[in-house]
Image (spheres, helix red, strand yellow):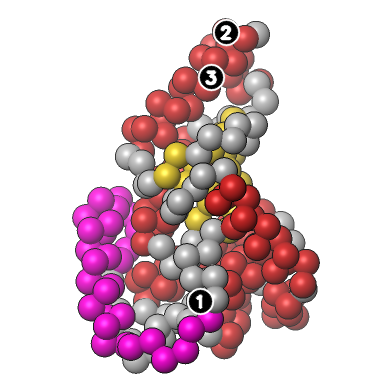
């Protein structure tokens, strides 16, 4: 008990996760990192934007997109709780990454709990429910389903949120994140890319605890 109390008394071990809502491996990483937070009270995760599709593109082929989503079976085979289903809707494909990130940032303005609810709904809606998370009405519906104030949805149009999304994307690229998910410690610039096994995240935390204990 005393040992755990001393660990809990340390400053939180903060991670920064660069992620995109259109990335299936980011959904898998989100599941594992949320578990890491639940099981380790001294761990925090800050989610930042990375844009796999930074620019809107019209006229994407739905049949080709459906075939692409068959590849989601790979991360699905590794998932503990996240649900992946190949695209079964006539909606979409999503035009670009930005709208979902703006909605997530707008939710974060309302607090951490609001962000977590919207963050989860965006991932679930896209990968399990075949809902186009670049569509404004779909995003408005997900906002309501997350239990947030309907009027606050308009926060997504704040130019400051778009600037933040773009700056986070540029930051990730500047630090060498060539893809997502990418993770780093808050006080370090080195990023590791890929949805690591849960045990790898645990080892990362254990090493950081040991480093801090030794420094202390």
What x and y, as percent, mark residue 21? Answer: 48, 65
Residue wearing tag 2: 214
* Residue at mark 3: 209
Looking at the picture, does residue 7 appear above or below residue 31?
above
Q: Going by the image, does 153 lie left or right of 191?
A: right
Viewer-proximal residue among 32 and 113: 32
Splitting the image into 4 quarters, where does residue 86 fall?
bottom left
Residue 92 part of the magenta segment: no
Residue at horizontal 54%, vertical 76%?
55
Task: Determine which of the numbered discs, if any, sits on residue 96 in the image.
Answer: 1
Q: Position of residue 58 (x, y in %)?
A: 47, 89
Q: Quick one: label 1, few (<14), some, or many (20+) residues within 10 Å?
A: some
State the separation of the CA atoms marked 3 and 1. 39 Å
127 to 182, vertically: above or below: below
Q: How far apart are marks 3 and 2 (CA)?
A: 9 Å
Helix or strand or loop: what does disc 1 sit on?
loop
Q: In this view, does 101 lie above or below 46?
A: below
Q: What element carries label 2?
A: helix
Q: Which region of the structure is painted magenta? A: 56-84
Distance from disc 2 to disc 1, alpha carbons, whole Å, reads 46 Å
User: Residue at coordinates 58% horizontally, 72% vertically from top-left?
Assistant: 98
Q: Nearer the viewer, mark 2 or mark 1?
A: 1
Q: Are marks 2 and 1 in contact (CB under 8 Å)?
A: no
Residue plotted at (77% across, 72% down): 159
- The picture places residue 80, in percent across and down from the top left corner, at 30, 50
């Amino acid at each position: 008990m005393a040992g755990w109390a001393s660990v809990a008394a340390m400053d939180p071990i903060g991670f920064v996760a660069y992620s995109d809502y259109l990335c299936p491996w980011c959904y898998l990483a989100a599941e594992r990192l949320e578990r890491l937070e639940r099981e380790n009270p001294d761990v925090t995760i800050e989610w930042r934007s990375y844009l796999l599709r930074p620019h809107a593109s019209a006229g994407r082929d739905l049949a080709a997109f459906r075939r692409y989503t068959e590849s989601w079976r790979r991360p699905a085979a590794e998932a503990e709780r996240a649900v992946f289903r190949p695209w079964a809707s006539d909606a979409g494909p999503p035009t670009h990454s930005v709208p979902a990130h703006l909605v997530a940032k707008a939710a974060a303005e309302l607090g951490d709990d609001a962000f977590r609810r919207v963050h989860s709904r965006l991932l679930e809606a896209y990968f399990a429910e075949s809902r186009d998370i670049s569509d404004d009405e779909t995003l408005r519906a997900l906002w309501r389903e997350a239990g947030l104030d309907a009027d606050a949805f308009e926060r997504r149009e704040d130019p400051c949120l778009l600037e933040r999304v773009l700056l986070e994307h540029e930051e990730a690229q500047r630090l060498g994140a060539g893809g997502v998910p990418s993770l780093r410690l808050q006080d370090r610039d080195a990023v590791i890319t890929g949805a690591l096994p849960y045990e790898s995240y645990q080892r990362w935390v254990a090493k950081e605890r040991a480093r801090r204990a030794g420094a202390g």
